[in-house]
Amino acid sequence: MSDRTASITRDTLETQITASINLDGSGSAKFDTGVPFLEHMMDQIARHGLIDLDIKACGDTHIDDHHTVEDIGITLGQAFDKAVGDKKGITRYGHAYVPLDEALSRVVIDFSGRPGLEFHCDFTRASVGGFDVDLFIEFFQGFVNHAKVSLHIDNIRGKNTHHQIETIFKAFGRALRMAVSMDERAAGQMPSTKGCL
């Protein structure tokens, strides 16, 4: 199996971001983004996805977190697209249900080559720790567009907004882990009747 790593740098007038990943890692995470709550959530991706993440970002957070959060999603999506390569032999689909106390979320992903996001979450509060929860859809839309995946996110229930969001990110990590894992039975085959993804 080839090395499934990638490092992507995105440099705009609003943000400067570098994202490095290892799809076959141990779940280690290093973040320096200026957005602590997002870092806490991305740590769930690394830990539950067993994907090594190293993300550094400098953005115009003096305005708000929007550009930084969205551009981290974009850069992370580009890194996944590069690291997964031609997709031969991957499982392709991944899904997970994750609970946290009263909250429960489901995430389903397909490395289809066709970007699409279905995001169904009625958060009980507008912010957590000063973080605007509306920005999570921007993060996932950026990821989806640049990783070229179909992604369905459903928060099925929850009263505590922190719990709602954390179940989403844990399930996202678990679904990613399943989707990018190599399928031994596929023996390097393309997981599509089209012959390409």
Image (spheres, grey):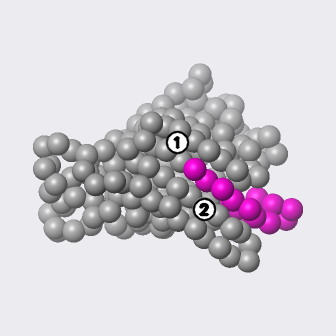
Callout count: 2
- The answer to which of 154 and 192 lies nearer the viewer is 192
Three-letter amino acid code at disc 1?
A: Ile
Question: In the image, 55: left or right of 90?
Answer: right
Q: Residue at x 64, y 64 (%)?
A: 17
Q: Is residue 144 above or below residue 178?
A: below
Label 2 is placed on what type of residue?
Answer: Thr
> Which structural element holds mark 2?
strand
When the figure is inspected, residue 53 is found, relative to residue 16, above or below; the finding is above
Point out the stretch of residues depicted in magenta. 54-69
x and y percentages locating residue 2 in the rendered image: 28, 54
Mark 1 or mark 2, earlier in chain: 2
Q: Is residue 114 above or below residue 108?
A: below
For the point 49% across and 48% down, which residue is it? 153
Identity of the residue furthest to the bottom in this view: 13
Residue 25 sits in quarter: top left
Camera-nearest residue between 101 and 43: 43
* Residue 106 in sight from this viewpoint: no
Tell which of 140 and 187 is nearer to you: 187
Mark 2, Cα crowd under 10 Å, few <14 / some 14-19 / many 20+, is some
Q: Residue at x 21, y 53 (%)?
A: 89
Tell me which residue sits at (45%, 36%) in the image: 26
Provide residue 172's location: percent of width, then percent of height.
48, 43
Point out the frontmost of discs 1 and 2.
2
Q: Secondary structure at mark 1?
A: helix
As for residue 147 lying within the magenta part, the answer is: no
Crowding at mark 1 (Cα within 10 Å: few <14, some 14-19, many 20+): many
Q: Is residue 122 left or right of residue 79?
A: right
Farthest top residue? Answer: 101
> In the image, is residue 59 part of the stretch drawn in magenta?
yes
The residue where tag 2 is placed is 18
Q: Would you name the residue on which mark 1 appears?
A: 45
